[in-house]
Image (tube, rainbow, N blue to C red):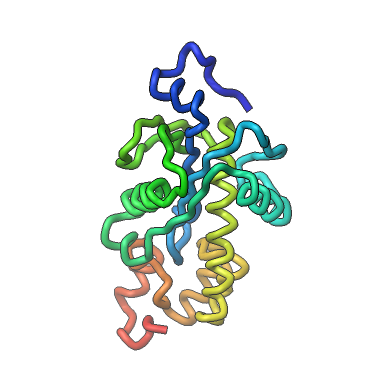
Amino acid sequence: MTRRPRASLDLFEQAALASGRVCGIDEAGRGPLAGPVVAAAVILDCARPIDGLRDSKVLSAGRRDELALRIREQAVAFAVAEASVEEIDTLNILQATLLAMRRAVDALQVAAEYALVDGNQMPRLAIPGRAIVAGDALEPAISAASILAKTARDAMMRAFDAQHPGYGFAQHMGYGTPDHLECLHRLGPCLLHRRSFAPVRGLLGGASDAHHVT
C-alpha cells in the first residue's frame, strides 16, 4: 500500500499521525436493493500492525472474518454504524451513507483527530479529514474499516434471511443478482427492500399493499 509522503500531508493529518488518532472510514452496502448501508471507523495501533489488510472486496469471506477478528482485538478503537432502509429511501443512498459514516466516527471509544474516507465525498464530521478515491486499497485504516463494514453487514443480512425467508438474503446479501430479482418478482418486495431503488419502485407501482409487507 502507498501513502503520500509526510511532507505533503497537511498539518492536521501530520499531528494526528503523530498522536496515532487517524481513523479510516468505509462503507458496505451502497449498491444492494435491500438492507441497510453500514459504515465502520477504525483507528489502528501503529505498534500492533495487522498484516494482510486489503480492500474487503478482494478478500475471501474466510479471510475477511479472520482479519475482522484481529482488527477488533488489536485496533485502538473501532465502531460500526448503519443507516436504515427508511433513511436510505428518505435521504437518498449517498446521504444515508455519509450519515452512517458520521455515526461510526461519533461512536468511536477513543476520539479520532483526523479522518481518511474511502471515495470522493466527505461526511460532515467534527474533525478534519480527506476523501481518497480507492482509499480501501491504499490506506490500511480504510482497508480495516472496509473489512469491518462488510463482515458486519453480511452478518446482518444472514440474520435477516431467517426473518424474511424465500429471498435468499444470506446468499446475495441484498444485491440485485438474477436469483434475487426472480424472487423479488415472484414474492414482491419485503420490508427490507429499498423503495427508492428502480427495480423495487417499478414493482411497487403495480403491487397491492398486501403484496409488499412481508
Residue 206 placed where, x, y %?
A: 31, 78
Query: In the image, residue 133 lies at what x, y percent?
Result: 47, 32
Q: Quadrant of the N terminus?
A: top right
Residue occupying the point 51% across, 81% down:
163
Q: In which quarter of the image is residue 92?
A: bottom left
Q: Where is residue 37 in the image (x, y as percent from the top left)?
A: 43, 57
- Residue 176 or 160: which is nearer the viewer? 160
Q: Residue at x 37, y 83 (%)?
A: 213
Q: How many marks?
A: 0
Q: Residue at x 48, y 54 (%)?
A: 80
Q: In this view, does 55 lie above or below 17?
A: below
Q: Which of 76 and 11 is in front in this view?
A: 76
Which quadrant of the view contains residue 90? bottom left
Let me know if residue 140 appears in the view: yes
Q: In this view, does 129 lie above or below 157?
A: above
Q: In this view, does 30 lie above or below 184?
A: above
